[in-house]
Image (cartoon, coloured by chain):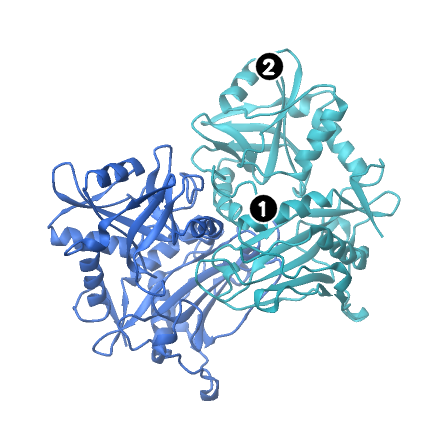
Chain colours: A blue, B cyan
Amino acid sequence: MAFDLERPFKFSETSVRQCLPSQLKPKPPVSELGFGTQFTDHMLRVEYDVDKGGWQSPLIVPLEPLTLHPAAKGLHYALQLFEGMKAYRGVDGRIRVFRPDLNMARMNNSALRISLPQFDGEELLKCIKKLVSLDREWVPISETASLYIRPTLVATDPVLGVNAPSSALLYVILSPVGPYFQTMKALTLLAEPNYVRAWPGGSGSTKVGANYGPTIYVQSVAKEVGAHQILWLFGENHAVTEAGAMNVFCVFINDKGRIELSTPPLNGLILPGVTRASILDLAREWNEFDVSERFLTMSDIVKLRSENRLLEFFGSGTAVLVNPVERLIYNNQVIDIPTMDQPDPIFLRLLRTLTDIQYGRLKHPWAEEID
Amino acid sequence: MAFDLERPFKFSETSVRQCLPSQLKPKPPVSELGFGTQFTDHMLRVEYDVDKGGWQSPLIVPLEPLTLHPAAKGLHYALQLFEGMKAYRGVDGRIRVFRPDLNMARMNNSALRISLPQFDGEELLKCIKKLVSLDREWVPISETASLYIRPTLVATDPVLGVNAPSSALLYVILSPVGPYFQTMKALTLLAEPNYVRAWPGGSGSTKVGANYGPTIYVQSVAKEVGAHQILWLFGENHAVTEAGAMNVFCVFINDKGRIELSTPPLNGLILPGVTRASILDLAREWNEFDVSERFLTMSDIVKLRSENRLLEFFGSGTAVLVNPVERLIYNNQVIDIPTMDQPDPIFLRLLRTLTDIQYGRLKHPWAEEID
């Protein structure tokens, strides 16, 4: 491999070039935050160049445009990956990130799959914490908003051959965000078997750009029938896999007459979401209902609904956290799901517990404080 | 759709800002040309911005770095596509491009699939011809080299939501190239069923970046066993689909005892190659052997070989044109193919005919002269 870690990068080498006070941008009011439309004052940059021995020293600099050769491989062959994390300002005023080690591990898995250089995740995490600390005034004072952290890695070498890049740029930008969907509302999903998000032997279990671009056209198909997102199916039996860019969960009465919380297993088609893992961990710790990782088919869903055994359906992800689903459209039929009618819904309990941890209302080792 | 052609762009609006004579770079000798490592003096840029009404006027400018916001969607979600074309300097000194209308049509198909704005292909082609004409001294004086033309379209709007972009940049760069593989030699391919290039309901029939990046890791698997490229298979019966980034052709004695030239059909998994289409057109015009578009499985290949009915195997594409294959590795077994042992191989006749057209030795409507 071209990407032995000849030269790793270390947080201790980081140089910081701060904005002048006159360059600092005004912070937007929480009520005006969208998703990923505004960015903070600084960014992190780490260059990789085989000709210079590998990774170069990290730089924290004022947010600035990238200057790329028009032949840069990242613009032609989707040699690019990203991560999504958030920093939360707790009720105690302290800033926390949520299980960032999982993002670092996943980012390295994505890098391997898309032929970009790997790195020491602990060192990148220290750099990210430093960046967030420098732009800490951008972390919204709000229990529904947060500072979205977007690490990105993209190939930069200006060579048109379809092969592994010899140079790349890792960068991190920060964006104060409100809820991903403008108002927290239950979603309608279109289960559309004619488009497929991921395939065995593909890259569906990593967070590479290539998994996202081709889905946007399909979103427009969903919009045409009044749905918010696509429910991605796989295989002849229409197994449920993901929704939009979220993992999915279903709550139902299983054949043993017990309540079961279920999500698809990590078989290579499913993104290993940090929120997904945390939901499974919490639910197993509670030990109050069955928890499973298995595929449900659309036939299973239809049957459960017809027998009044389908209780809840929801998506999860860093951007949305937990988002209820109240309706599926499948084969031109509407399947209403009583997610919002449950007296004590599991999705809401999970949402509350996760936000309690993230906003410091509940002390938990998953929440790491930033100095 | 956001991308009605509110405002198309037209060649007649093109502005040209030429390099100063002192900025012109020296042209490399033909013997030192690689593939896509050197670029000419000028580039074409056309911006698209919903807020400005759609497409802006084309600009031909000195080759310059792109300045992109680090949140530009093209760097995160593989909202990008490209084309590959070539300009050839003929034996008569005139410069020609080969069936460029097919590239323009495919580029618009790619744009639709990856949610980028469509455009009038005839207008873009006029702009490209103007660009090539301006940099005509870069078209190598050689019957094995050419000027590779790389149109690219990438989303530029700095918004992290996974949805259709409101701004994009179409640009074209030019690179003098030698043969794609350093020496024209017969290839060894690894038929590897554990990785998949494309699937039904995906984007495999369009030229979007997302189809290329994830294949590079798999190339390294091929290299490990001494193969040059991957032979992409699909389905439980291991149907042969493509090789590396090439279409594939097989020549064999069919069940009727006749020679047959066969390539996979355009069922959504296969890139509709311009060279592929031209090979089919030529072979059908010759009408000397059977020509088919159908899938062959690896079992078919093994059986044909064991019965001494397998004659030739080759890849096709704009970069390689026609490249013979002499060996497949499949299930740890080697399948030798006598492509190079045929007395009058079809691949070579096709290669000669195509290059005769491209280099002006044979007058043909597929070759369009550039003034």
Residue A51, x across and y down, in percent: 55, 60
Q: Which residue is mark 1?
A: B207
Q: Is residue B69 left or right of residue A299?
A: right
Q: Nearer the viewer, residue A307 or B180?
A: A307
Q: Determine whether label 2 and label 1 are within 8 Å by CB.
A: no
Q: Which residue is mark 2?
A: B308
Q: Nearer the viewer, residue A357 or B29?
A: A357
Q: Quadrant of residue A106?
A: bottom left
Q: Is residue A367 visible?
A: yes
- Quick one: label 2 or label 1, which is nearer the N terminus? 1
Residue B253, x across and y down, in percent: 63, 15
Residue B185, x across and y down, in percent: 66, 34
Q: Amino acid at mark 1?
A: Lys
Q: Which residue is pictured at 18% across the width and 65% down the height?
A: A364
Q: Is residue B322 visible?
A: no
User: Residue extending furthest right?
Assistant: B92
Residue A56 bears which disc, if any? none
Chain ID of residue with mark 2: B
